[in-house]
Image (tube, helix red, strand yellow):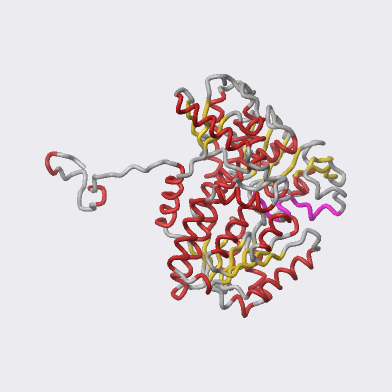
Amino acid sequence: MSQQHISHSDASANATSCDFATWARDYSQHTNRSLAGSRFILTKTLNSGSTGCAFEQVAQEWGMNIVQADSPEDHNNFTAHVESTAVEPDLRTSSGKQAMDLAQQHMPVLKKLVDQLSHEHDMRQLRVAMCLILEPKTAILARLLVQAGAQVGIYSGPETLNTRVAQQLESEGVTVYANPAWNPEEAKQAALTLLDTLKPNLIIDDGASFARLAARERPELAATLIGVAEETTSGVRAFDAMEIDQVLPFPVVAVNDSLMKTGFDNAHGTGETCITTIQQLLGAHCFQDTALTVIGFGPVGRGFARRARTLGAQVTICDTDPRACLQAVFEGFPTRDLKDTLPAADMVISATGVYHTVNLTHMHSMRDGTILGVIGGMANEIALDNIPQKCSQMNEPVSELHIPHGPHLTLLAGGNGINYTAGGGNPIEIMDLSFAVQVAALKWLLENYRTLDKKVYRLPDLVDQQIALAALSSRGYEISHSEDNTSNNWQVTRFDQPNGTQY
């Protein structure tokens, strides 16, 4: 059984420090492990944090489970955990092998799903092309599939590449197509070369770009695919549109729409690491008393907004969906029209995955120095393609963006997704769940593809439940079991009173 225990002494925090913002940033950025959902061993020395709230309360609002270290056993666990985490490598500077080995250590659910897949199917028949951000967690998905017998090739764009991890993967027998020096044409040609060389029968995609390239320029390969597993909201939207237009040439599993993906990867993984990556770029207390506009109150925006508020931000939500706005209001966030919030905003964060969410008119209405960024994201979610001469430092984590005849803005991560461009991406434990869903999607496609139409499918709820059970078990938690089955009997109504009991 694998349990994640975190102490307040981890990540070089002072043992008596009450500064949750600094501690959370340092631990998250150092280890790329998830704070949300972890056990937090709390000693009585912690009283109040920088926001004026009890440290325990702030940690719980963040999504951590508090364990009081009152007994000798608790203190022993506390000491043992401090000693074990002290030797964990910093994932930002460790070797590719160190980073991958640490990630695999904390991805038990993915390992269980791959073992089940290999037990039930001949993996030697699988040729899997992956188009994903290439970093340690993605590498474990590829590593485990190769170890199970599959042929795997992975493509990564130059802006989302960890070269140390790419080199390690190649040494383990994974074909890697990735180079930070590629221009757009070279990047496209590399993706086509992967298709031509591997001739995949399964694709794991991020943003639907790779599979759509296959459909457009290698239609003969696309027509023979068992199917595609799509990771992102924007990618699922693209495949849904292809289905509506009746041009989708293969079955697609919308991995993104699984609760075990969206409910954790988006809300907790992206929401958490985008906060701590921005802290890494701008300072641990950059959210304190900041007027923050969050555009989009889907799972990503919601997870981000809640944690920014925990760190002291004054958050306003902008969304075009009245249901999302009402949900935000019921969670204590004011909602306004975007054009009305921008002139007073200190920071504007887009969380929509929609092209030109922040357009040139929006940018003109901002003040000098307004911080602008994207979490999650797609190309030109901020309309940078409408700015002819942006700046020479666009690839820097923090750069100045000159709006023609307008303000000078502070742009984060070149307008790309902040956590994976300027940070380590979603936490290890979160990607354990997301990639478990990816493997479940591959298994479902293998078992059903002969009867599938060329459309977008969602995984059955039972698959999500099985992954959740495995995740709970790995953390030492249980579910409740009901012995009363009357709720499943449709014949029993409130007007029936067997044995004097009303249902």
On the image, the x and y values in percent for residue 135 come to 66, 53
On the image, the x and y values in percent for residue 42 come to 52, 26
Where residue 355 sits, quadrant-wise, is bottom right
Based on the picture, tell me whether residue 382 belongs to the magenta stretch: yes
Where residue 370 sits, quadrant-wise, is top right
Residue 246 visible at all: no
Specify the principal SS of the magenta part.
loop
Tell whether 142 sits left or right of 490: right
Task: Name the residue rendered at 62%, 80% in the picture.
Answer: 220
In the image, 186 versus 3, the foreground residue is: 3
Relative height, residue 341 to residue 218 (above, below): above
In the image, 241 versus 126, the foreground residue is: 126
List the single residue furthest toward the left: 499
On the image, the x and y values in percent for residue 69 come to 49, 25
Q: Which residues are magenta?
A: 376-388
Tell whether 105 sits left or right of 503: right
Relative height, residue 147 to residue 321 (above, below): below
Residue 323 visible at all: yes
Based on the picture, tell me whether residue 423 belongs to the magenta stretch: no
On the image, the x and y values in percent for residue 503 come to 21, 42
Task: Name the residue rendered at 56%, 41% in the picture.
Answer: 325
